[in-house]
Image (cartoon, grey):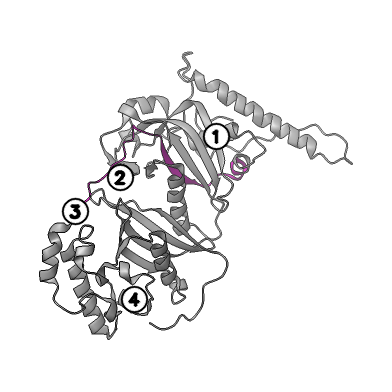
Amino acid sequence: MAADTESLPEEGLALWLTEWKVSTKIPWLGRHLVASVGSTAAGQLDFFLHPDGQAVKVVMLRVHPDFQRRGLASVLMDALYAAHPTAWINHGWRTENGARWWNGYREPAPQRNVHNRPPEEWATYFDAVDVASDKAHNAHQNRHYGLDGHREAVYRYGERLEAEAALHAAAYRPVTPVRVDPGAQPLHGAARLVLPPAVHEYVHDRAQDPDARAAALLEHLGHGNLPREAYWNTSQQAAFADVHHEDLFDRQPSGPPVTHVVFTLAPLQASVPPAARALATSVEFEHPGDVAVDVTGLAWRQADRPYLTHQASYAPAVAAAIVPLSAQQASAAYRARYDEEGFLRAAPRDGARPFADRADQIRAMADRLLRGQAARARTHRPSSAPPQTAVQQPSTPAQRPPGPSQRP
C-alpha cells in the first residue's frame, strides 16, 4: 500500500462507539465504530462482539472517498484493538481493496489475530472451518494481486487447513441470544425534528421552565405521533446515539437546525403487541397499528450542541401512542383520542370532557408563555421612546392544516 498522501486534521476528528442493530438471528452484539470530521461522517468500522467481550468479528471497514489515503482506516482498526485489549480478532475475508490496505497496515497485536494462531486457542469462539475458508480466500487474493499480506505472521500460511480445522470444529460453542423484555424496564426512543423557528427558540431557551418546554414540544409533535421507525433502547444514551448516527449520515450541510428528542416510556407490561423485534438491549415494534404507551420523561438537544441537554419528567405519566403505520390500521381507542394527524381531539360538544386531566396543564402552559412574552416586551422597550400599548401578535400555528382541534 502506498504511503498516505495527506494527513488527517489535528482538530475535529472524533471517534465514537454505538450499537449496531442487526438481525435477531445473530446472537453476538453489533457495534459501529464511527469516525467523523466536523459534522461529516468520514469512516465506519462494523463488527460483532461476543457477549463475554473476549472475541470480535470484523464485518466491514469503509472510508469516505474524501478521506481515503489519509490513514483513517488504520486509526479505526487501531481503536478497535485498543477498545478490546484482550479479545481475539477475526478479520474474516477481504476484498481487493481490503487486501491492498491490509498489506500496508501494521497490526498492533498480531498475536490476537485468529488467522495467526492455531485453532485450539480460539475454536470456542469461531467455527474453525469458516476461519480456514476465509484464510484460503485471503491467500488467493494475495497471490492474485502480488501482495505479501504479512505472510510470515499467518499460521501455516498456504498449507491445506481443512483437515486441521475439522479437528477443532466440535470445540465451537454457539451463543444463546439474549432478548430485552419491554415490560421489565423503561424504554427510550429518539426522533429528529426540524421545528418552526418560534418553537425551536422556546424549547431550547434554558431560562424557561423545562416542564413547560417539554409539554410544548410534545404538544407540537402530537401525543399520538411517537416515532414508529425508532429502536426503543434500555438507556437514554443509546437512544441519543441512534439518532446522532442517523443525523451524521443524513444531515444537510446548510439546512435548518435539527433537534434530537428522546422519549422515555414506562415499562409496557401487558400492552406489548406480539409483533416486536427484540434485540439484546433494544426493541423495534413491527406491529402495524398503534402502540399505547405512557411517557414519563423527555430529553432534547440541538444536533450540533450535544453538550446542552434539556430534561423534564412527567408525574404522573402522560398517555401517548406510537403512531400507526396508517390511519386505517389505528385502533378504535387511538381514533377516539387522536385525529388522523396524531393530535388530541377537541372536547366533544355534548359537554363530556374525556381529556379534562390535560386541560389545566395546557392552560397553565399557555399562561406562562403569555407572561414571559409580556415580560420580555417590557424589558426590551427602548428607554427613549414613549410607552406604547403592547399589541399581541398571533402565535405561529403548528405546521399542519387547521382543524377543529387547532389550539392557539
Q: Residue at x 55, y 71 (%)?
A: 9
User: Is tag 2's residue or tag 3's residue first in the polypeptide sequence?
Assistant: 3
**Which residue occupies 10% across, 70% down?**
163
Q: Which residues are magenta?
A: 175-200
> Residue under circle 2?
279
Rendered-image quadrant of the C terminus = top right
Q: Which residue is mark 4?
A: 102
Instruction: Assign a secondary structure to mark 1.
Output: strand
In which quadrant is the N terminus drawn? bottom left
The residue tagged 3 is: 173
Any magenta on residue 271? no
Q: Identify which amino acid the numbered label 3 is placed on.
A: Arg
Distance CA(mark 3)–CA(mark 1): 45 Å
Element type at marker 3? loop
Name the front one of labels 1 and 4: 4
Task: Please report contact status of discs 2 and 3: CB closer than 8 Å, yes or no.
Answer: no
Q: In the rendered view, does 8 fall on the left or right side of 152?
A: right
Instruction: Classify residue 121 by image quadrant.
Output: bottom left
The residue that label 1 is drawn on is: 312
Q: For the view shown, which residue lies furthest in the top direction?
A: 351
Contact between labelled residues 2 and 4, with CB atoms less than 8 Å apart: no
Q: Position of residue 191 (x, y in %)?
A: 45, 45
The residues tagged by marks 2 and 3 sit, at their Cα atoms, a distance apart of: 20 Å
Q: As shown in the figure, which amino acid type bears the numbered disc 4?
A: Trp
Nearest to N terminus: mark 2 or mark 1? 2
Q: Earlier in the sequence, mark 4 or mark 2?
A: 4
Callout 2 amino acid: Leu
Q: Is residue 400 shown left or right of residue 178?
A: right
Q: Is residue 159 above or below residue 169?
A: below
Q: Position of residue 249 (x, y in %)?
A: 44, 59
Q: Is residue 58 above or below residue 204?
A: below
